Amino acid sequence: MDNELIQALKDCGAVKFGDFTLASGRKSNYYIDIKKATSDPGTLTLIAGRMVAIIKEQHMCVEAIGGVAVGGIPLATAVSLASGLPLVIVRKSLKDYGTGGRFIGDIEGRSLLMVEDVTTTGGSVIEAIRSLRDEGAIVDSVITVVDRDEGAQSGLNAMDVKLVPLVCASDLLGQ
């Protein structure tokens, strides 16, 4: 359990209580607003440092850091800067103007680490991984700031993708 990160998330106002509808459509009596953490330089630096440490400790073969718009972008950017690895941005949908495309950054044949703000069912990152793999990227790991323990782990495991949470919701709420 990462007590320093848990405290930082609470101190920056990322943990909220009330009635919320999550991206998955589920209802919840708490919400993890990681945008509060990513807009706080100290907390964002702490998160990026933790993610880079995991990359090193677990000897992950990573050639780029990916994040899904919008919540994953500040995290992926911070981890990219802290690690020196290139950034890949995954849009939620295909852009049909300008240069077009769904991805910003080189992906074909590259091993990407996806970073997420909060995982519930994992739907957003699972869909992004499918699209990345369809374009030739190799994705076998996701690091999330908070896992709500509501199915993301099993959904990613079914795709042979490892989910590594910095904090589980039960730890965050239990303190």
Image (cartoon, rainbow, N blue to C red):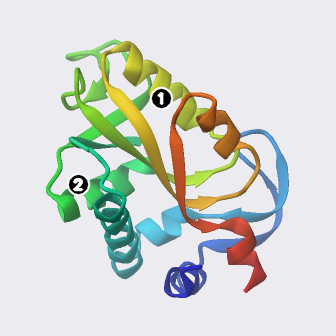
25 with respect to 93 (left or right): right
Q: How many marks?
A: 2
Residue for point 37% across, 49% down? 73
Quadrant assignment, res 59: bottom left
The percent coordinates of residue 107 (x first, y second) are 24, 26
Q: Which residue is mark 2?
A: 80
The percent coordinates of residue 18 (x first, y second) are 83, 68
Q: Could you tell me which quadrant the C terminus lies in? A: bottom right
Q: Residue furthest left?
A: 84
- Location of residue 62 with respect to 109 vertically, above or below: below
- Residue 42 in view here: yes
**Nearest the eye: 15 or 168:** 168
Disc sitting over residue 72 in the figure: none
Residue for point 52% across, 44% down? 162
The percent coordinates of residue 76 (x first, y second) are 33, 52
Quadrant assignment, res 62: top left
What kind of residue is marked 2? Ser
96 with respect to 62 (left or right): right
Q: Could you tell me which quadrant the N terminus lies in? A: bottom right
**Nearest the eye: 31 or 46:** 46
Cα gap from disc 2 to disc 1, whole angstroms: 18 Å
- Location of residue 59 with respect to 37 vertically, above or below: above
First-in-chain label (2 vs 1): 2
The percent coordinates of residue 139 (x first, y second) are 39, 33
**Nearest the eye: 75 or 60:** 60
Residue for point 29% across, 59% down? 79
**Nearest the eye: 171 or 21:** 171
CA neighbours of label 1 inside 10 A, class few (<14), some (14 to 19), many (20+): many
Q: Which residue is mark 1?
A: 128
| SS class, disc 1 | helix
173 with respect to 94 (left or right): right
- Residue 69 in view here: no
